[in-house]
Image: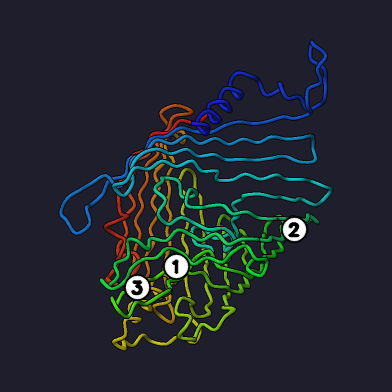
Amino acid sequence: MIRIILILSLIFIGSAYPQDFFNDEEGSSESGILLPSISYELNGFIRGAFFGGKVVDKEDFEMKSGYGELGLKIKARKGRFGDGFAEIRFRRGSEFNQTLSEFNLREGYISAYVGNLDFHLGHQIVVWGRADGFNPTNNITPQNMLARSTDEDDRREGNFLVRTLYHCHPLRVEGIWVPQYAPSVLPIQLIPFPDFVRMGGADNPDANFKNSSVALKIDLELSRFDGSISFFRGYMPLPGIFVSSFDLTSFIATVVTKPYKMQVLGCDFSTTLGSFGFRGETAYRDPVEDYQSESNPHIPNPDIQYVLGMDKTKGDFSVVVQYIGRYVINFKEFKPTGSPLDELEIKNRMISSQQDEISHAVFLRPSLALFHETLNIEIIRYYSFTTEEGLFRPLISYSLTDALTMKIGAELYSGPENTLFGTIDESLSSFFVELKTSF
């Protein structure tokens, strides 16, 4: 109840009082009371969304998710030396046949500006990489693979960070410290395990300083070329699966999600050549612990990931085409041993996308804007030539008014057995309808 009152109070303040109630300069009201030197911005959205799809293992259809959601973005500024930003989400509905009620502070942080130095402290979302859709250097904050939303950005989640940026054009140096680990949300509950396996939650590291992560990035920004080199050392947002205990009496194994430390050296670039844009990104990932040890089945091999893409816009039509590749170092073909741990290795290879030594995939995003950009048609198509996994995501967006938008589309996964997309296809594939008003 307190949360609802807080949200309604913020909406009332933003609508009842104009922005200049908080003046940029200190001054007196008619009563002689000094007003603080603060300005603010308040905006957000309200939306209703429905997702429907096939019932798992049945020739029938069901509601996968249905909800109403309120989102608020608040930015308060104190002079030119600092500001604060917060994004609040409140969602109510049903998902996975269970009642859904969420109050989420998606971001909330304070920024200070001193000369060429920016300092950000709080719960933040950080996105690294210049490629479209797949970013091998983006390892700072987690993602939610189960997020039901028409907006791809809603998959991103925040974490508490200390982030500093130093501007010395054409260079920008960025340093990040992550004191405590926050995992990505995986579709673990949707992955079938043998009857003797039980899920036991997560085995995440505590807030000891030795478990923190650090990252450094140097950006070069020129008129026709942008690029960066980056380094990350710490726990990866994407965890693996680990056997935490095995009961010899009942022959029951309890498995948990468990993160692992990596050192990641990456670089990216974007440039133009005539009317074409080109983007590239690559990262070398090296485990800190012994990934070949039988006691660390959750740690993937070192690998090299790379993306090369081209984009082109002509009139109301635009297209993005990308090649995505991965090379797994010290790769060994999987050979069943008859051990119960065989299933664990298969699942870990599936989650880390290391089922093959070399993999090739393509990402395609054509889009068309019509009727003065009130109608937008977009298709996302991903296909792995190596594992035969695929994603097809058509989306039609129509602006009924300046602030009211309707979206219709689908998100369809496909793939063979023992692949991630093939495992989650019936659970997560769906068509959707959304109405959204912004303010």
Q: Is residue 270 left or right of residue 39?
A: left
Q: Quadrant of residue 47?
A: top left
Q: Is residue 162 above or below residue 327?
A: above
Q: CA distance from mark 2 to mark 3?
A: 39 Å
Callout 3 amino acid = Thr
Mark 3 or 1, nearer chain start: 1
Callout 2 amino acid = Arg
Q: Quadrant of residue 167?
A: bottom right
Verify CB contact (< 8 Å) between mark 2 and mark 3: no
Q: Is residue 281 above or below residue 67?
A: below
Residue 15 visible in rendering:
yes
Mark 2 or 1, nearer chain start: 2
Q: CA distance from mark 3 to mark 1?
A: 24 Å
* Local crowd size for mark 2, using a 10 Å CA cut-off: few (<14), some (14–19), many (≥20): some
Which residue was labeled with disc 2?
172
Q: CA distance from mark 2 to mark 1?
A: 36 Å
Number of on-image labels: 3
Most foreground residue, 11 or 405: 11
* Local crowd size for mark 1, using a 10 Å CA cut-off: few (<14), some (14–19), many (≥20): many
Please provide percent x and percent y for residue 72. 54, 35
Callout 1 amino acid = Thr
Tag 1 secondary structure? strand
Structure colour scheme: rainbow
Most foreground residue, 415 or 132: 415
Please provide percent x and percent y for residue 84. 69, 40
Which residue was labeled with disc 1?
257
Q: Is residue 348 above or below residue 28?
A: below
Front tag of 3 and 1: 1
Verify CB contact (< 8 Å) between mark 3 and mark 1: no
Tag 3 secondary structure? loop
Q: Residue at x 28, y 87 (%)?
A: 338
Which residue was labeled with disc 3?
387
